[in-house]
Amino acid sequence: MTLADLFHQLSILIGLPAVLIAAAASATIVVARDWRFVLFAYAALSVMLALLLSQVIPTEWALLQAIVGGLIAVMFFLAARQLRWHPASGVRWQDRWPQMVSLGSFRLLAVALTAVAFFVLRDQVTLPVVDVLFRDMIFWLLLIGLLGLALHEEPLHAGLSLLVLLGGCELLLFSLVQQRLLIGLLEGGRLLLGLAIAYLMAARGLETARPAVEPSPTWNADDLRA
Amino acid sequence: MIYGPELVLGVLLATAAALYVLRRLEGIAALSAAAVVVGLAVLLWRLPLDIPVEVFGRSVWLGRAVTWEAERVTLQIGPAAVVLIVFLLIVAAISFVLARLTYQGHTFYPFGLLLLAIWTIAAMVQPLILAPFALVLAAIIAVFLIQAGKTGETRGAWRQLLFPTLAAPLFLIAGWYIEQAPLNPDDQTPLVIAGWLLIAGFVLLLQPAPLHVAVPAVAGQAPPVVAVFLWIGGQSTVLFLLQRFLVIYPWLTATIDSSAWLLWLGVFTAVLAGVLTAVQQTLGRYLGYAALYDYGVLLVAMALRGTAGLPTALWLALTRAFALLTLASAAALIRHRMESDRLSHIGGAISRLPVAVTALIVGGLALAGLPLTIQFASHWALFQLLAENDPRWVLFLILGATGVIMGTVRAGYACLGRLTGSPVEREPRLTSLLLLALVALGLVLGLYPQLLATPVAAVILPLSTLGP
């Protein structure tokens, strides 16, 4: 089976179903606390974006979106596995990684309000070249990405929100410019960004995941908190 | 034949790779890194751009472009890029030596060289619209330098990564609008949209107040000399790009009054940072806000680029690098020896670290632009220039400077008294000598600012006529 055949098989998803799945996945990234749900949602979002991109750029290039998204999800998984809660860690279940600065119900309400804002404002948004479906997808990803950046401090969620926002930007940019170099640069940059975020996830999470075993070696950690 | 971009990037990247292997041998790594960047700076400054010359038996053509025809991407060292690259290389050489003497961590040398290579790419790349992407790469590398293996707090590394990453797509989309403009010359809409996208992108890259949140966070988290190196390199590169955009796209100035928004942002940044400097409780954050005040002053100078602002901005950029490195080295030494950077915990530092405390005070006062310090003449020249437009702006900047002076007095006062905690080792002789040299040189340049006139005059023409 060639790559074109694979995309042909998946063509039933291209269009509204892909947009709906991507929208739901991006909302899950902002709302859910559990890292497994969040990473699964990001992987699903990357695949849906690749399917949508295959409409505006060659299939091989669009596949890069899914591959890079998958690699980022793997890097995040490897980092998250070190930080996952274990009864022997001495950390209470409520204090497990990742720690959130807001309640789940609050985040759900914020996403609902963002959805209301999306439906009110979407007709006023004019983007060059792209059709209505793409416009809605881009606008939703930008809104939900900004909301995630505003709501989260934890590198896992904040980093994924940034990647969601960049996904929206890429959808617009690749619709405007079909240049091999640009696609390569942006996807390479996204991979490096994922690496940096995974590093920050581990750096931040190690302190909360295993306080008894590995205390922070920084002499000024208390000062920084103050 | 070796072309300029190949030479600069090849030397920087090869040295970075070698020093990553040798990073545990910190003394060797620091000296090698400093020697390589000084050598490269001398080569760039001395060699002609327009003709090939023999260097160590190899033919080198510094100004020749490296082009990827298929992708329409070019790297070329122009006269203006030489100015920025040489400045960054000299700052890096001083930072490497200071970092070795003030215990800033052994990963700084390879990663610092890598950052230099990326900033150099930003200065050389065409189309210009790709340059901000290089700044995103620099921000990604900086994450590892700022975090430096520490667990816990990640705010500084994250915040400095966020804004350039948000800015890069705006530039790329603006690039598409710029390409559309010639297709319908009567319609100015694409240029207006591109102008607003570029301005928004530059605001995110410049990070003036209220987007300044990365500066104090990095100051509190990263080793001081590393933080200052990141600020000087990043901010200088962004301002260089701003100047390049304004010269290469003259319609940008016609579409949006860049002077007005730079002036407002610069003054707001300087006032806010100055006031906040006065009330900080830690050396790191005091350093961050003092540096931010001076950055606001630099933005104001850039706002006046239409008059004599550009030479003043250049002068400020030179003197602030010197003042920042003096202050950061002193803060780093005090933090390291006193095992804290809270002002309430560094009492008695004067008895064991007198030179570091002196450098801390002199560096802080220099950033405020007080007389007899290296920054006085450049600040004074800017104030005179600004007063010609509207004297009220000068009063705002003086208000900010007062805050920096108060912060410096508080930091200096905190170092007085008697030691209360565990015994503190005296400052190393070599470090003391270097800090004394920095303080003395600052005073000399404060008394005889005309000594800097020649280098400023030499580079002002290429910067004001930045060609592609």
Image: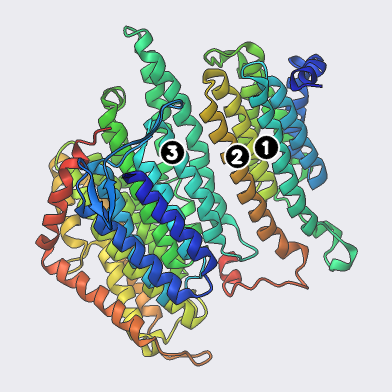
In the displayed structure, would residue B69 be above or below residue B427? above
Q: For the residues tagged 2 and 1, is the chain the same? A: yes
Residue wearing tag 3: B132
In the displayed structure, would residue B98 be above or below residue B318? below
Q: Secondary structure at mark 2?
A: helix
In screen coordinates, is B117 left or right of B354?
A: right
Q: Tag on residue A190?
A: 2
Q: How much space separates mark 2 and mark 1, taking CA atoms?
A: 8 Å
Here the colouring is rainbow
Q: Residue at x 49, y 52 (%)?
A: B214
Q: How much space separates mark 1 and mark 3, taking CA atoms?
A: 21 Å
Q: Secondary structure at mark 3?
A: helix
Residue wearing tag 1: A68
In screen coordinates, is B327 left or right of A199?
A: left
Give how far across and how far down residue B161 sits, in percent: 53, 48
Which of the pair B205/B21 is nearer the observer?
A: B21
**Among the 4 quarters of the image, the one containing residue B321:** bottom left
Give how far across and how far down residue B97 sits, in percent: 37, 71
* Residue at mark 1: chain: A
Q: Are marks 2 and 1 in contact (CB under 8 Å)?
A: yes
Estimate how packed mark 3 is, as few (under 14), some (14 to 19) or many (20 or more) residues with alpha carbons within 10 Å: many
Nearest to N terminus: mark 2 or mark 1: 1
